[in-house]
Image: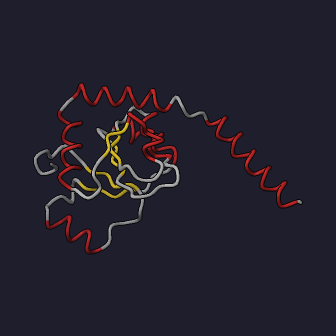
Amino acid sequence: MLKANPKLNLLAAGGGEFDDDEMKWIKSLCLEKQIVQKSFKENELGYFYQNAEVFVFPSLYEGFGIPVLEAMASGCPIILTKHGSFPEIAGEAGIYLNSNSEENLRHKIQMLLEDKELRAEFVKKGFEQVKKYNWKDAAEKCLKVYQEAISLKSR
């Protein structure tokens, strides 16, 4: 997909610099100019989400998945696994991949890149889904759990 479209880039977020073996593999594919590893500062994330064609989160487990909400809130369609909390967080706004299939991931990415209407549909679904989450409510629920834990410890 990257070789077919030299204007397309893969931005690998977090996880540290690529190691020697990863760099060798990327160079063997002649994709070193299109695959970039980047660590982000918090204030940069919105820009990258807003300018991305798609956000792919192939994680097999996440406790909550804040990046999923950030991507949806920024108007970026998401492709993710059905593991952990993802189905609850993304709901119908997520395009779910078979985590054991490279071909399935390739197909899902290609769908979003080629079908502008489908892309717009999932951006809209993401905006609707993210409305279900309110930071004030989340903070209040978290505070309540902490207060209950402190109360139990005091007994």
Residue beneath the point at 39% across and 40% down: 49
Residue 23 in picture, x, y percent from top left: 25, 68
Residue 97 placement (x, y as % from top left):
29, 48
For this orientation, the residue located farthest to the right is 155
Count of residue discs:
0
Residue 52: % across, % down: 32, 40
The answer to whether residue 64 is above or below residue 71 is below
Considering only vertical position in the picture, is 85 above or below 118? below
State left or right for residue 27 relative to residue 63: left
Name the residue rendered at 32%, 44% in the picture. 96
Q: Nearer the viewer, residue 47 or 77?
A: 77
* Nearer to me, 120 or 26: 120
For the C terminus, which image quadrant?
bottom right
> 106 or 61, which lies in front?
61
In the image, taking residue 130 as reference, residue 28 lies left or right, namely left
Q: Residue at x 46, y 46 (%)?
A: 67
Please provide percent x and percent y for residue 145. Answer: 73, 49
Residue sitting nearer the eye, 60 or 112? 60
Q: Residue at x 34, y 58 (%)?
A: 37
In the image, taking residue 36 as reference, residue 25 lies left or right, namely left
For residue 12, what is the image quadrant?
bottom left
Q: How is the image coloured?
A: secondary structure
Q: Is residue 154 above or below residue 74?
A: below
Q: Identify the residue at the far left of this view.
A: 4
Outermost residue, bottom side: 20
